[in-house]
Image: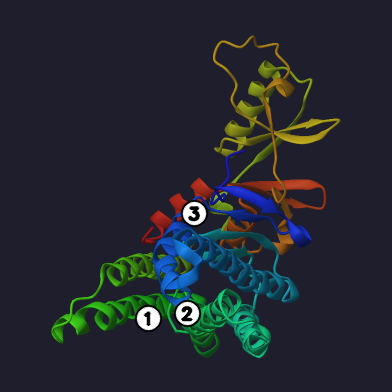
Amino acid sequence: MTTIDAPRGWRLGAPGGVPIHLSATWPILVIVIVVSFGPQVARAVPGLGALGAYVVAAVYAGLLMVSVLAHEGAHAAGARAMGARVGYIVIDGFGGHTTYEASRLTPARSALIAVVGPLANGALAAAGWFLLPLLPEGVPRLLGIAFVLTNGIVGAFNLVPGHPLDGGHLLDALVWQVTGRRDLGMLVSGWAGRLVVVALVGWLVVAPLLAGDRPSFLILAWTGLIGAMLWSGASQAVRTGRDMGAYHRIDLPSVMSPVLVVHEQDSLDVVARRVEETRSRTGLTPVVLVESDEGVGLLAGVDEGTPAGTPAGRFTDPLPPGWSVDVDTMPSVAAIVDHMHARSVSMVVLRRGEEPVGAVTASAVRAALTRAGAAS
């Protein structure tokens, strides 16, 4: 079955059951770090030589990954502690992000999940600061200082109140708590994130130009990359807020398709007849699940011209974890969409006990949101 928001890159493992993926954009960040940090190392420790300086810069990139993993791992642990199911962690060229199911969180719990990431970086910075006097002069001390500064800056910067930064999630939780509207919290934090980008560009680029200085290429590149990332995340928050505002205009039955369960030995002509009977009765095309001794799969991809007597089991795709949930735990469209993103599935079968109630697809939700006047 096709998934949504599936992470791309390399899977590093799944400690505690949470998959960690290294995005293909991470090597780009490593190259930028090595190219920009290497000459600084060469000037600080002249005896290393050019090659040694770039090796040290690469080691620093590794330490940065440790910091990002600590930050995102704290979010994942916090989400689990607050009762949210965690999807995965991605380490990418802009740092990283953690997906988790947030539909049943309260504003306070959402804020706690957000704040533990910067706190983890603060703890690493504090630990590094206390260990600095124990590190030998030269490369170890230089890496230690860089580690402390990086974690301090990352922790503090993430507390800036604007999406997609953790401070934006805190602002979202505050507005949500005060107004009782999560959609308004997302809209406010998203627009605040856009203002953060404007302020960043003004501080690092416009102000120096007005003062007669010319920002270096490195400053311009970093400002462009970080600004683009922040603007994209802030805009996504604005779109999500608008979508959330439309959710209350969507009732669950309007996005549910009927579910038809067949056996793997049932022939395709029998399945087609049952599909037509369901369509005539409900006016909707059902999602067809195929039962077998190995479990349940999704009927998909039947080749044109296939003999009608072919067993349905020949055209069954496996279903990923999270494809089926109890309908009583997913009372709203917003909760189902959040589950889809957290588990990277594009279809969810709702059941009551062992009996399927209906299926909700990402495409059906998108169509309903469009009809309800959502921006995306």
Residue 345 visible in the displayed image: no
Q: Which residue sits at x=36%, y=77%?
A: 191
Observer able to see residue 280? yes
| Left or right: 213, with 232 as reference point | left
Query: 243 or 134: which is nearer to us?
Result: 134
| The disc label shown at residue 79, or none | none
Q: Quadrant of the N terminus?
A: top right
| Left or right of residue 187: residue 337 | right
Q: Give the residue displayed 63% in from the left and 22% down from the top.
A: 272
Q: Earlier in the sequence, mark 3 or mark 2?
A: 3
Residue 280 in which image quadrant: top right
Q: Residues within 10 Å of mark 1 (few under 14, many from 20)?
A: many
Distance from disc 1 to disc 2, alpha carbons, whole Å, reads 8 Å
Q: On the image, which quarter does residue 79 sit in?
A: bottom right
Disc 3 and disc 2: Cα gap in Å? 27 Å
Amino acid type assigned to the residue bearing label 2 in the image: Gly
Numbered tag placed on residue 27 in the rendering: 3
Q: Nearer the viewer, mark 3 or mark 2?
A: 3
Give the quarter of the figure containing the C terminus: bottom left
Residue displayed at 39% across by 55% down? 370
Q: Residues within 10 Å of mark 2 (few under 14, many from 20)?
A: many
* Three-letter amino acid code of the residue under disc 3: Pro
Tell which circle, 1 or 2, labels the residue nearer the N-terminal end: 2
Secondary structure at badge 2 equals: helix
The residue pinned by badge 2 equals 168
